[in-house]
Image (cartoon, grey):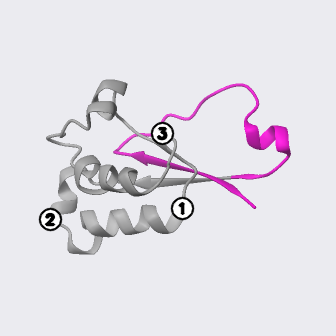
Amino acid sequence: MLRSLLLILGSALAVGGTGASAADAENIPAEVVVLSVLHQLHGEIDGYSFDVLADVIESLQPDVIAVELTNADLESRREQSTKQEYQKSLFPLLEQYDYRL
């Protein structure tokens, strides 16, 4: 079984980190999926709408989702003026699934 990590990012990606992960400890290969998002433009693109984004995230069944939010914004579920994918796609999924963030 593969462990999966879903990264939700805007226009830039910084990759880094040190130390062994749980997957390393169990000697299980990890799958990392980088999903580019359009922020508020999902509202203007039929083929990649907020609903489509939510469907893609749900179909990937990630164990972990990395987000571009502060802990305070994440905990409060504060609406984002630009990063609208959170309140329109991700936050509803967090109510249904036990994703680690």
**Residue interval drawn in magenta:** 1-30
Q: Position of residue 61 (x, y in %)?
A: 54, 61
Look at 63% across and 28% down and name the residue there: 17
Distance from the alpha carbon under mark 3 to that under mark 1:
13 Å
Relative to 17, residue 11 above or below: below
Residue labelled with disc 1: 61
- The image quadrant that residue 74 belongs to is top left
Q: Quadrant of the N terminus?
A: bottom right
Q: Earlier in the sequence, mark 3 or mark 1?
A: 1
Q: Residue at x 81, y 51 (%)?
A: 28
- Residue annotated with mark 3: 101
Query: Would you call the spot at circle 2 few (<14 residues within 10 Å), some (14-19), or many (20 or more)?
Result: few
Residue 36 image point, x, y percent: 39, 54
Q: Quadrant of residue 58?
A: bottom left
> Please, what is the three-letter code of the amino acid marked with disc 3?
Leu
- Position of 101 with respect to 81 (left or right) is right
Amino acid on which disc 2 is placed: Glu
Q: Is residue 101 above or below residue 93?
A: above
Mark 1 crowdedness (10 Å alpha carbons): few <14, some 14-19, many ≥20: some
